[in-house]
Amino acid sequence: MNLSDVKSGQTAPAPQVGALATLLPRSAIILELKSRNKEGVIQELVQPLVSTGLVKDESGLIAAILSRENLESTGIGLGVAIPHARTDTVTTLSLAFGRSEAGVDFASLDGKPCHLVFLIAAPEGRKRDYISVLAKLSSLLRRETVRDRLARAQTPEEVSAVLEQFDAASGR
Amino acid sequence: MLFVEDTPASPYAADWAIKLSQRLSARVFALGVIPVRTTAVEENTWRRLYEVEDAAFEQNVRVSLLLETGDPLQRLCALSASYQIELLVVSADTRLRTAELIRHSPGPVVFVKPPQEESQS
């Protein structure tokens, strides 16, 4: 926790990160995940980031994400999980998205399976941006309209469009 | 249960709770409560919760994040009871009504203030 930010009694202003949709390559949008467990889902979501050259060490990234999963649940409830890691196995802040009709157990506190999974990977030095993206996504995904639109999207382009629309609206 | 707020001492309460949990191999439930849902307030609350999560992860402490809408005092006490929380950690400059918190809390409450040199500066 960065205590230097609060010594003056003020919290540092939120950093400006790029629009969420720009962090999510179209090839990293999987409309129907094949895996039925969280380890498989994480591997499936990391794979397209490897293919696009954003990951330097695939097994290192998977291990970093799973080590967090072993310590905490990244299922935020309402059928949503956001597995994440800060690690230098990635070259830039990146997202991947997967959808599972059957649902995947991410040990969410509400006990419900997750149908929408966003994976976030960021280099060690991008802590503030990484936390901002986590916060922005968590906030957006608590909105029923956003979850419904993501659940009904027929193409990766539609998924990107949903993020663009609601991300822009939240910034107004 | 750590109550996370937008107050100067709240990060110190988080540090204290994480260190205690590390010594006791306990789990931290970090709770943020927003009275009314607005995107900016909700996003800022998530940001503070994820900062706690990141710090806990670095100390190898298990953490669960909770964001609730409603009356902060009521939600804190209700969730502490439902999760059978053993200790409530709150910053000394909390905006909660402390007398009511103590009266309604299902367990002991610790109020954490910044270290002496910080509070004097």
Image (spheres, coloured by chain):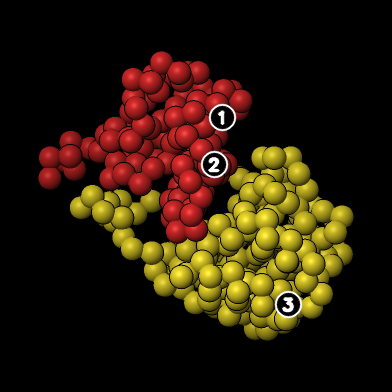
Using the numbered discs, state the Cα–Cα distance from disc 1 to disc 3 in whole angstroms: 37 Å
Residue denoted by label 3: A158
Q: Nearer the viewer, mark 1 or mark 3?
A: 3
Check the residue under mark 2 and report the chain it is in. B
Q: Which chain is red?
A: B
Place of residue A83 in the rendered image (x, y in percent of width and height, measured from the top left):
64, 58
Relative to B29, is B118 on the left or the right?
Answer: left
Q: Are marks 2 and 3 on the same chain?
A: no
Depth order, front residue of A112/A4: A112
Mark 1 and mark 2: Cα distance apart in space: 10 Å
Q: Is residue B21 left or right of residue A48?
A: left
Residue B22 shows in this picture: no
Residue A98 sits in quarter: bottom right
> Mark number for residue B112?
none
Dot 2 amino acid type:
Glu
Which residue corresponds to the image point at 59% horizontal and 61% vertical from the top-left?
Answer: A140
Residue at 82% of width from left, 60% of height from top?
A: A100
Looking at the image, which residue is at 34% across and 25% down?
B98
Percent coordinates x, y for residue A163 in the rendering: 63, 72
Chain A's shade in the image? yellow
